[in-house]
Image: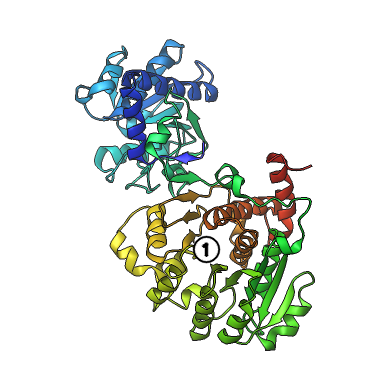
Amino acid sequence: MIELLTTAEMAEADRLTIAAGTPGIVLMERAGRAVAAAVARKAPRGAQTVCVVAGPGNNGGDGFVCARVLAERGYPVRLLMLGDRGGLKGDAAEAAGRWRGPVEAAQPLALAGCGIVVDALFGAGLARPVEGPARAMIEAINASGLPVIAVDLPSGINGSSGAVMGAGVRASETVTFFRRKPGHLLQPGRLHCGPVAVADIGIADSVLERIGPAIFANAPALWSDQFPVPLPGDHKYRRGHAVVVSGDLSHTGAARLAARGALRAGAGLVTIASPPDALAVNAAGNLAVMVHPVDGAKELAAWLADPRLNAIVLGPGGGVGGRMRDMVIAALSGERAVVLDADALTSFAEAPETLFSAIKARGAAPTVMTPHQGEFVRLFKDPLQAAGNTSKCDLAKTAAAASGAIVLLKGSDTVVAASQGRASITENAPPWLSTAGSGDVLAGFIAGLLAQGMPAFEAASAATWLHGEAGSEAGPGLIAEDLPEALRAVYRRLYVDLGVWP
């Protein structure tokens, strides 16, 4: 279940299901019962009062069903409603009509005496900031310190972007339906959700073929069929040769981290393209990684004429300015896979179209850019102004379309986007990945997979997932040097899951 549905796509899934013969009230009944089951797992019957806070739409209808089911099972239930019950329409009105208990006004003081809260105020489709009584209620729920089960998405969180629309409920757990939404994974929405359970309410998986979702949770199911697994007859020359361009004598560490990452990711050979003054340092600092002297763009271009050098990383510790720009253009001139990180991106901040034109001129040759937020804004300021205030997924897609590259926008919710509109969102990155050199290793992981022939979108997504798993494997206190070494255990588990080892 890696597909993530925007609010519009989820509405279409509901519509298609209803059109195929399942009444909307049946879907609402199943949704409310799923939430009631989550409450029952968390709270013993009769031990505490359940307060269901219902809103004026279908999310509120789910809340009415949940309240009725819990009351039928012997739970003490109070139903607090924001707005007028008479204003409910359609399925929500029918669900409310089946509730025989009292309906209280949803106001902060009404939470007194509650033991657990069901947040059924607003669902994933919230499109404007909450204010007035709604905001006061959300803030009161958060201030109460009570466990909260959110229906579909915590109220105040935008389902497509994960944005907090003025104020957002901080849930202990969220129950959503059929598929998760991007807002469950994107920050800051993810921080508000708690664990997310996906309930089956009778929507057939076949509707996904009609909807054609383009956003996915980043997991092996997304890219495992393209993942390069070594075969018994393989040798190093069949597993690709990755190149990492080093900075000067005082800036070699980043390139060495990237090179180690590429080697651990499976590239058959890895060479650091080193300025002559840093040659001895790079050679002494590596064993399995080779070193080759390269002094500037002309020498790089001449060396890269060897077609066996099929993937290259530029940017980590490489320096900002004309020299780096020239080396990037030289690297982009061939058909090899190119990963652009850090200084390679910042060097084009004042001339992004020069970079984008060179990338687009490559046609199908793979290019991956790996900016963090600051680099992203510097490089894509014009496309971003045109895009306006949209989700991180939309921003990454806009950048991919503008540049012609696969764009990996880093963060705890890293998004990988392709110019054709596909995007993946990563959810397995531990917080201790936020350390110097971590991104350099990620660039190396990507290059290592590209060198083995993995397609660019899949390689960038897989490398990001591997990066998160390696971070969890290394654990708190990790430094960047730990990540390539942790990859061995990650690969072992992945190969077992894929059925290729032992």
The image quarter in which residue 395 lies: bottom left
**Residue 212 in the image: above or below residue 482:** above
**Residue 233 in the image: above or below residue 495:** below
Q: Residues within 10 Å of mark 1 (few under 14, many from 20)?
A: many
Q: Which residue appears at 23% of the width and 29% of the height?
A: 83
Q: Which residue appears at 78% of the width and 69% of the height?
A: 288
Nearest the viewer among 271 and 494 is: 271
Nearest the viewer among 214 and 48 is: 214
Q: Which residue appears at 30% of the width and 32% of the height?
A: 107
Q: Secondary structure at mark 1?
A: loop
Q: Which residue appears at 63% of the width and 84% of the height?
A: 248
The image quarter in which residue 8 lies: top left
Task: Tell whether 308 sits left or right of 362.
Answer: right
Query: Residue 480: where, in percent of width, then height?
Result: 67, 64
Q: Which residue is mark 1?
A: 366
Q: Amino acid at mark 1?
A: Pro
**Residue 40 in the image: above or below residue 285:** above
Query: Residue 76: where, in percent of width, then height?
Result: 43, 16
Task: Tell whether 424 sits left or right of 91.
Answer: right
Quarter of the image that includes the C terminus: top right
